[in-house]
Structure formats: C-alpha cells, structure tokens
Image (cartoon, coloured by chain):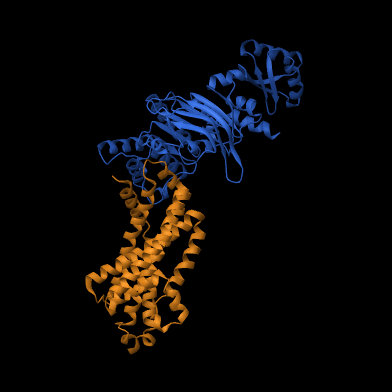
Chain colours: A orange, B blue
Amino acid sequence: MPATVVLTFRNLVKNVRTPMLVIASVAQPLVWLVMFSQTFSRLADTPLLRGLGYRSYLALLVPGMMVLAVLFTGLQSGLAMVTDIDSGMLDKLRISPISRLSILLGRVLADSVTMVAQGAVVLGVGALMGARVETGWLGTFGMLASVALLGVVGASLANLIALRGRNAELTMVAGIFVTLPALFLSPAFLPLRFQPNWVQAVARINPASYVIDVGQRLMSIGNDWGQDVRMLAVLAVAALVLMPATVAAFRAATR
Amino acid sequence: MQAITARSPAHAIEVEDLTKVYPGGHPALNGISFAVDRGEIFGFLGPNGSGKTTTVRILVTLLRATSGTASVGGFDVERMPGRIRQSIGYTAQATGVDDDLTVHEHLVLQALLHGLPPSREQQRRIEEVIETFSLSEVAGERAGRLSGGLRRRLDIAQAVVHRPPVLFLDEPTIGLDPQSRNALWRHLRGASQEGTTIFLTTQYLEEADRACDRIAIIDGGRLVKEGTPTALKSEVGEGRLRLTLADSADSFRAARALALSPDVVSVESGDALVVRLRSVGAGLADVVRVLDRAGIPIETVETGQPTLDDVFLRYTGRAPRSEAPAGAAVSSLFAAAHGRRRR
C-alpha cells in the first residue's frame, strides 16, 4: 500500500477522532454566516445589491464563509505538523522506508478531503437558509474545488511556519494574522466596488479575494470564465511561491 | 574511509571516529568508534548529556554527523539512509505515539509503513507483539488515554512489530514497571537469539549488566571503556565487600586500617564501608582479621561481585547520574552509590 495513501488515511482518522477540531473550524464560519446575514440583512439586502446580480446578502456571504472554514483547516494542518514533531510521530515516519514527500502529500490530501467536506457543510447550511447555487452542480463542484485549492495554499503557508518555527503558538498567531485580513480585504462581506480604493488594490493580489469572487459569481451572478482563469492563475502563482518553500522547509526538517 | 560492503558486512553497526557538533558550537560527540556484531545486545551506558541519544539519532538517520563514518547493516548513514530505514526499528526517549489512534491502529500503521501489507502475517505479528507487551486489554483504546507505562510499551511494540534486523532503543526501560521490564528483556533476548542486533542506551547499570552482551561506557562524548560486563567488572577488582560497623564513628579508622592490607584494592567509607578486593577468598579473612585487631566490631558483611557502578566510577570518576530511580529496578548498590556522592 503506498505510504501516501496510508498517511492520508491516518490523518483523516485523526480528524474523525477529534471531530471537535473539524467542527470548530466550520462552526465559526457558520455562526458568522447566520449572524451577518441576519444583522446586515436590512442594510445590505438592497436593490443596489440585487442590481449587481446577487440573489441576497446571504448568497454573497456563503463563499467567504467557505473560505474562512478552509483557511482555519489549513491553519490546523500546520498545528498538526507541530504536534507530530513534538510527539515524536514525525521521527517515527522519518525512520520508515517511505518517501519523505509522501509524509507531506498524505497531509495535503487529508486536508483537501476535510476542506471539501467543510465547504459542503457551509453550502448546505446556506441552502437550508435559502441561498442556492444558481449555476447548479457544476458550479457547486467549482466552488468546492476552488476553496479546497485555496485551503491547500493556506495549509502550505501554515506548514511552512510550523516547520520553520516548530512552535504551535507562533503558527496559530501567524495563521490568524493572515486569515482575517485575507477575508476582510476581499468581497467576502461587501462587493469590492463599495469598498475604498486601497482595499480594491490589495484585493487584486489577494488569492482569497479571487476565490470568493468566483464563488459569488457561481452562487448567484453567473459564471465568468475570464475571472475563473484569473483565479487559477493567481492560485498557481501563490502555490509556486509557497510550496517550494514549504517543501524545502520539510526537507530541511527531515533531510 | 571504509569501503561499503553491502551484502554481508562483518558488523551490524560500525562507527568510526564519529563527531557531532550542534549548531551553536556545542560538541556532543568527540570522535567515538565502536562496532556491534550481528545478533549482539550492545549497551550504551552513560550519564545524561554524554552523547548517547546523539549517537542513536545519527545511526537511525535522523541526525547528520559532523564528521566520521557510521554504517548500519553495511549501509553508510550518509550515503544510503534509505537502505538503513528498511532494516531498523527505533524507540526514542520521547515516545512517538499519536493520541488519536488506537493501540491496534498504531501497530497496523507501523507495519504498513515498514512494508508489511495487510495480510494474515501482518495480523499474526501484531497479535504477537500485543501479547508480548501485555497490550491486549487496551488494544482498542486510544493512545491518548493510556498511562505513561502503557504508552512506553506501545512505543516499543511499534518498533519491533515489523521485526527489524537492527533495533535501536533509547532508554527503553524508563517509565516501565519491573514486570514490563522483565517482559522486555525476555523479548529482546529471544529476538537477539534469532539474529536481531540490539543497540540500547541506559543509565541503569544493573540492567546493562544483566541484559547486554557487550557494553560501552560513554562520557562527555567520548567512549571511555568497552567490553563484556564480566570483563569490565573483573578489571575493577574481583571481589567487593560491604561492611557495616557496630559504631559508624569507627568507619574512618577502619578505612585507614584496611587500606594498608595487601589484598585490598580500594576502600570507600560512607553509610557503609565498600571494600574492593583482589580476591574474595583470601581477602575476606584478612579484612575481618584487620578490623578485629583494631578493635572495631563489625555488624554485617555482604560479599558480592563488583557492579557496573564500580566500573563507571572507575572510568568516569563519578557515579552515574540519573533521574529518580524507578523503585525495584534499581539495585541497592546503585542507591548506595548515590548516597556516597551526596556526602
């Protein structure tokens, strides 16, 4: 049995065993989803918003909350790496005759599965509250795939910090420091055109912003291939910058 | 530089002039050399910080040496770490246990990672180690709920489930109760008889004495002595007496009188007098005579072979340091050695 499969399975079993971790990272986005959609509904559910193509403020919120869930899970991926280092599990894996990369791949694959599941939960709750994906199954698939891709990029960053710092608190603080601005400097809560110019400028280099924008289009406005390609390009650039650094850090830690 | 002999190397482990300097300049190993034969139980004995763990971590390919060469199963640690990983088992001092997985799952995971596919054979081996280390009652339990001793046993079970030809155990008995220690030693004996090479580190001299075929004493990153427990002990002196006097105020006078006797190698006075003799036979009578003549009444006499305590003391100049000794596993002599040091 390939080591990558074995380790993916091990990491998923861990998630199932401590469901609180998975639930916690999806609970917060759900709470926000309910809270924001209720408190801001009168202010935000306006003809102006609908004029931009959004079905409702709730529909606008859903993609951002999916992104929040996967970014939290990415952060936990880094924390799990620190735990494996501290508990001696990583050493156990390192002395096994398996490829070093399978240790990292096993983590990324397990993270992706978890992220898709969390994205689906947020979408499901959104649907229960009345926000359907207008572009159908294909659009749903596109949303889940794109948030998982972003989540993996986030996990890569968290693992990079975890491997270099070997410190859970540091990983946590750095993760939150990145996650919340990534969310707020995007159309997650408000269409970008209602936001100041500098936010729009920052959002142009924020991968999360592209994923949220594409999600919002798939959710209500309608697909835009041009924007899809731009999102993929930005994610690819982010991955190309981060992943080699993470792999290098992992190689340094595991030789 | 030695040639790589991959097929049937003379030794299971060969270490040549190994040094390790940690980043920051702290030297952990100052050029150690030794060899371990196939099927041998080799004990690496030394106080905390002497370089035991550093040596093990270099041998199991977790750490890179600064200079020198080391090979396991004929494979060089620097050039062929992948081949070494195919033939080793390892338990670290910090147990490599995942709180979220059950005992049984740990063993399956290790078996899979070490290339033992799901099969009857895999099942059989897992059941075997569960039996050996008395884990059957907790086999379905998550590791996070296990006591320290059980985690330790699980960790050792993980290291042996794939039956590695070379086994590295870094202080395997810390935190084990006497019963588990005995089970461990029985298992290691059996494995060694089947050809498994076992490299272990310990601070417990008594343990190394009973369990190891050969011992190396390491101190300050240097190998100070190597040999069989018997040979090392006989170098220190053949016999050893432990005397308690009726009046402990006499002990200094007694020590002085005894030091003059030709059969006596050394005398230490403390809670009791520890006298090392060239031979117990002639020496015992001599000691009793000397003290009798000096008018010093003896309360008890114990005779015994010298222990590795004595060896350690002799070659490193001090008693082995240790954490709080775990009850019955520590000999009274060990405790006596500590008592002496405190004075």
Q: In this picture, is A233 found above or below A104?
A: below
The spot of residue B180 in percent (x, y) is: 44, 35
Q: Quadrant of the C terminus of chain B?
A: top right
Residue sitting nearer the eye, B146 or B57: B57
- Visible residue check, residue A83: no
Residue sitting nearer the eye, A143 or B264: A143
Residue sitting nearer the eye, A72 or B155: A72
The quadrant where residue B249 appears? top right
The spot of residue B287 in percent (x, y) is: 69, 14
Question: As drawn, which residue projects farthest toward the left?
Answer: A137
- Visible residue check, residue A159: yes
Q: Would residue B313 appear left or right of A113 to someone viewing this image?
A: right
The quadrant where residue A54 appears? bottom left
Counting labels gives 0
Residue beneath the point at 48% across and 58% down? A161
Q: In this picture, is B79 found above or below A5?
A: above
Residue sitting nearer the eye, A82 or A49: A49
The spot of residue B149 in percent (x, y) is: 46, 41
Q: In this picture, is A193 found above or below B340?
A: below
Q: Would residue B252 appear left or right of B42 to someone viewing this image?
A: right
Question: As drawn, which residue projects farthest toward the top?
Answer: B282
The spot of residue B122 in percent (x, y) is: 29, 38
Question: As drawn, which residue projects farthest toward the bottom?
Answer: A47
Q: In this picture, is B176 found above or below A63?
A: above
